[in-house]
Amino acid sequence: MKLVLYSYQTKEAVAKLKSEGVLRLTKADEHFTWSGHSNQYTGFRDAYAFMVHEMKRRLPPPKFEDTAFPIWAWNKTEGKKPPTKNLDGIHRGNVRLRIEIDEERVLLSDFDYFAYLVGGGLYFKFTKEDEEYVEKHLFDPIETFYPDWQRIFNLHRKHDDDYGCSVRKETIQATFWELFIEDVTEFKVIPPDFPCEIMDIIEHRNGH
């Protein structure tokens, strides 16, 4: 079964996709992966490492052995299928790609929960017992919290849950190892002057 996804890429990345037939990230692209995030921003790095760990566990291996980091796309935003005006506004000046990809190549996850991890969150449920657990294990390896972090893959949660992070209607992100030119059915350049609400930009930067 094919999934329809939308990914926003720079014009340089699209040019590489068209010339090489594939878009992927290797260890040499690590500076691009952390773009916009401080090297000391451990919340982002920990969340990203967790996503890579889960992709290795849940998905078939990438075609190229040196592929190291995922490509990101949108499956749903605030309960709606993209593209949306807000997403286009956030990514103005870039290129929107409509993608049709085999679902077994894709890992879907909850964007709001992932953003909570990016912000340095360690544990989703904040009862008194949970707070004591976090305090006790605060300096343990980050993998200690991986079992709880599996919640980001629950795509059918309540919107008003009590897991300790602010949530909206379903906003589902997609990650996969490689994007091939044959996966793309449409390229759409978003004009650099496309209207964008400032809160949309802030919200996006607090995510991935």
Image (cartoon, rainbow, N blue to C red):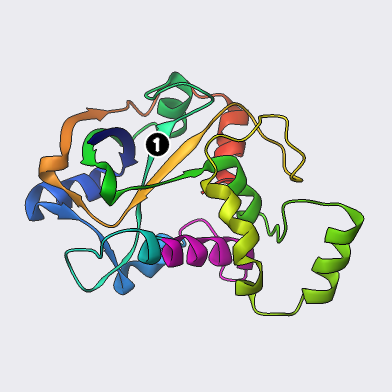
Which segment did they paint magenta? Answer: 35-54
Residue 114: x %, y % from top left: 57, 49
- Give the residue at x 55% y 39%: 204
- Give the residue at x 57% y 55%: 150
Q: Is residue 205 left or right of residue 139?
A: left
Q: Quadrant of residue 189?
A: top left
Q: Is residue 155 left or right of residue 1?
A: right
Is residue 51 rendered magenta in the image?
Answer: yes
For the stretch drawn in magenta, the main secondary structure is helix
**Residue marked by disc 1:** 74
Closer-to-camera residue (9/126): 126
Closer-to-camera residue (45/50): 50
Residue 173: x %, y % from top left: 44, 41
Q: Is residue 177 above or below residue 45?
A: above
Residue 103: x %, y % from top left: 28, 42
Q: Quadrant of the N terminus?
A: top left
State whether residue 35 appears in this view.
yes
